[in-house]
Image (cartoon, rainbow, N blue to C red):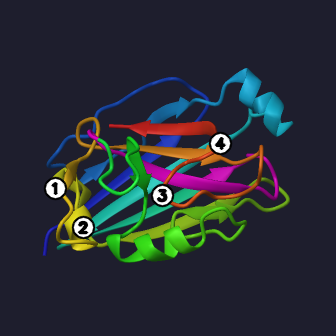
Amino acid sequence: MKVRNFLIIVTGVSFIGLLPRNADSVPPQAMNLIISPGNAAICFHDYSNTSATIQIKERESTTEVTIKVRGAKPNHIHTAWIKIAGPSPISGGGATPAAPTSEIDNIIATAGTAITGTNGFYTNAAGNGTLHINLDFLLSDGVYPFSRYDSSLADIPLGNTPFSFRVISHCTDDLQHGLSPGTHEPTFQIQL
């Protein structure tokens, strides 16, 4: 069984590193904290000491993703997204929830609520939060397999090479928005 492990560190430092496609293990890499001063003002939070990590492990036909945020806005909802290269065949957007295809109906059902779906998490009083996602596909295959959800839908290539994640906050309304990011403030971008 081939196992690939990736660990990416996200901090306020601006540095973009590329993930070798066939690497078994990649050392931590600093990435971008992308919240704008205007969005930080909306969130009423100083992000100067905010950081996040993402760990990605591929096993056979699944991908385990763990995102940890430290020092973000306390007691607040965040969601994680995977950039795709074309419009989503479900929502028409350029990103899709960082979630397995088996959870799409649950994400739709919780849209517009403060309930965190598979791609959402709350930070605690210290602004720390963790999200565990078990994708039912390999990120290294380079596509989000919408056809697993509905066989009439096309699979869409992932944006960037090999993939890009975004973690966003929902300070404006403290709600998650289902298959669309909705009202949000971009906070971290993990682009490889």
Q: Residue at x 49, y 37 (%)?
A: 189
| x then y, percent, for residue 113 | 70, 66
Dot 1: within a 10 Å radius of its alpha carbon, few (fewer than 14), some, or many (20 or more) residues?
few
Secondary structure of the residue carrying tag 3 is: loop
Q: Are marks 3 and 2 in contact (CB under 8 Å)?
A: no
Residue 119 lies, with reference to residue 91, above or below; the image says below
Secondary structure of the residue carrying tag 4 is: loop
Q: Which residue is mark 3?
A: 179
Q: CA distance from mark 2 to mark 4?
A: 27 Å
| x then y, percent, for residue 14 | 52, 23
Q: CA distance from mark 3 to mark 2?
A: 18 Å
Occupied quadrant, residue 186? top right
Q: Residue at x 78, y 47 (%)?
A: 73
Q: Are marks 2 and 1 in contact (CB under 8 Å)?
A: yes
Q: Which residue is mark 1?
A: 141
Magenta segment: 69-86
Which callout, 3 or 2, points to the residue nearer the camera?
3
Q: CA distance from mark 1 to mark 4?
A: 29 Å
Secondary structure of the residue carrying tag 1 is: helix
Of pointers 2 and 4, the one earlier in the residue sequence? 2
Which callout, 1 or 3, points to the residue nearer the camera?
3
Of pointers 1 and 3, the one earlier in the residue sequence? 1
Residue 54 lies, with reference to residue 43, above or below; the image says below
Q: CA distance from mark 4 to mark 3?
A: 13 Å
Q: Amino acid at mark 4?
A: His
Q: Amino acid at mark 2?
A: Phe
| x then y, percent, for residue 70 | 69, 50
Q: Which residue is mark 2?
A: 137
Which callout, 1 or 4, points to the residue nearer the camera?
4
Whether residue 86 can be seen here: yes
Q: Which residue is mark 4?
A: 184
Q: Residue at x 74, y 22 (%)?
A: 37
